[in-house]
Amino acid sequence: MTTSSTLPSSSLATLAHQTRKAARQLAVLPTETRDRALEAIALALETHATEILAANQLDCETALAEGLAKPLYERLKLNAEKLKGAIAGVRDLSRLPDPVGVTQIHRELDAGLVMQRVTCPLGVLGVIFESRPDALVQIASLAIKSGNGVVLKGGKEAIRSCEALTRAIHQGLAQVGIDASVVRLLTTREETIALLKLDQEVDLIIPRGSNAFVRFVQDNTRIPVLGHADGICHLYIDQSADLSQAVAIALDAKTQYPSACNTIETLLVHQAIAPQVLPDLATALQDRGVELRGDDRTCKIINLASVQDATEADWATEYSDLVLSIKVVDSLADAVLHINTYGSRHTEAIVTEDRQAAAEFMAQVDAAGVFHNCSTRFADGFRYGFGAEVGISTQKMPPRGPVGLEGLITYKYQVAGNGHVAATYSGSDAKPFTHRDLGIA
């Protein structure tokens, strides 16, 4: 297994360079070989499932004893169902088209002078994540499919789980003759700092964790960073909503997996239907263990001592737990204004039967994902059919939202001529370019 103990930055740079070399070899392998590697990894994960789950159980026991925060603990847990889902994601990836070597543009610049734009891997990814050992499986498999090397750094709370998963992944790679150093696991905080300094060997950093953690990464590296610092998502129940549908969606968006970044943290309700929907919804949420915090109008409508007064800080808080802030708004425009003020550009949803209202919401809300009459929990690479995701990006430049294979690919321009020189196409007697698209086979 290619893991490492604490290493000086120079030694880590050497290991990262080895990963880059292995990635270059991976990138030129046939599609079939990379897909066979994914199937071999899936089989190895299934074979070692008992060992992997036992390792995770030890991590969970240690985490409980050390008082790990509840949201992190929930992400740390890897049960049989979650592992099965991760393995299914690996197999889904093997069935997706190869993103490497795709010709995007094929153009004649002049007779005998042809330009093509062809996709290629980024190179080496540095992925740092807290808890969530299943993320290691998703990221490693995406890297292999896209021809990239990856240096993984999990949190100390998941060290046994990550090591067990990496052993299985390396076994699968070895079975098809791929250099295991293409997937490398680091295990210490010191290595995290060293990894962030490897701008000559690592092409992209992808952090997955709390907002404080992601901001730390962003502030301590010159390597481009893909990710999001906050997951403050909203659900707006419009005056034309189907109320039974609204209740079901709100419950799912808050309680299905409270520690996920696509879980709602604030519920906005139009004042016209707030008296009808809020009492039943509050009861349903509290029955699921949700702590409610409401503005003045919300508290008057629900009229329960258990509902706390919401503060300004609540609107800007990612709870990652069974806590929900509720605000009554006067209009769709007020809902959009609130979301654009406090949201994190992650995922926002509206429940309404008014198509015009839905269209306005989806056009005006600034977020990577805007949903109509469905839960924000669908903001996920696996659910989008990407096979898996390396993370979710809330930046404006692409890739945006759940990042699958397309976010790990760049392109290069290939130009082939027959002794052509630029001087021919400049000056008073410049020859014109033909710029004729040749089509893509």
Image (cartoon, rainbow, N blue to C red):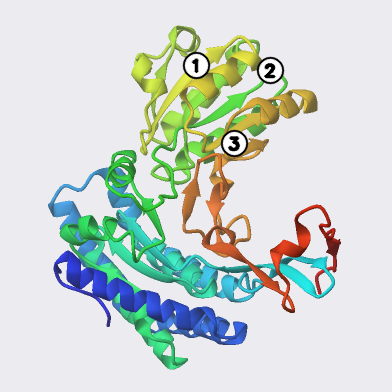
Do the residues under discs 1 and 3 have CB atoms within 8 angstroms?
Answer: no
Closer to the camera in the image, 280 or 424: 424
Residue 107 location in percent, x, y? Answer: 79, 65
Q: CA distance from mark 1 to mark 3?
A: 18 Å
Question: Horizontally, is 93 left or right of 318 in the view?
Answer: right
Q: Amino acid at mark 3?
A: Ala
Q: Residue at x 16, y 59 (%)?
A: 190
**SS label for mark 2:** loop
**Around disc 1, counting alpha carbons within 10 Å, would you say few (fewer than 14), some (14 to 19), or many (20 or more)?**
many
What amino acid is found at the position of numbered circle 2 in the picture?
Gln
The numbered dot on residue 248 is 3
Determine crowd level at label 2: few under 14, some 14-19, many 20+ residues with C-alpha closer than 10 A. many
Q: Secondary structure at mark 1?
A: strand
Regarding mark 3 in the picture, which secondary structure is present there? Answer: helix
Residue 439 vertical placement versus 268 (above, below)? below
Front residue of this view, candidates 199 and 164: 199
Q: From what the image shows, is residue 354 above or below residue 421?
A: above
Residue 438 lies, with reference to residue 67, above or below; the image says: below
Question: Which quadrant: the C terminus?
Answer: bottom right
Mark closest to the chain's N terminus, 1 or 2: 2
Q: Position of residue 305 (x, y in %)?
A: 35, 14
Q: Is residue 151 left or right of residue 233?
A: left
The residue that disc 1 covers is 327
Whether residue 194 is visible to the viewer of this picture, yes or no, is: yes
- Judging depth in this view, the residue of 323 and 86 nearest the camera is 86
Q: Earlier in the sequence, mark 3 or mark 2?
A: 2
Q: Which residue is mark 2?
A: 239
Closer mark to the observer between disc 3 and disc 2: 2
Q: Position of residue 1 (x, y in %)?
A: 27, 83
Mark identifier at residue 264: none
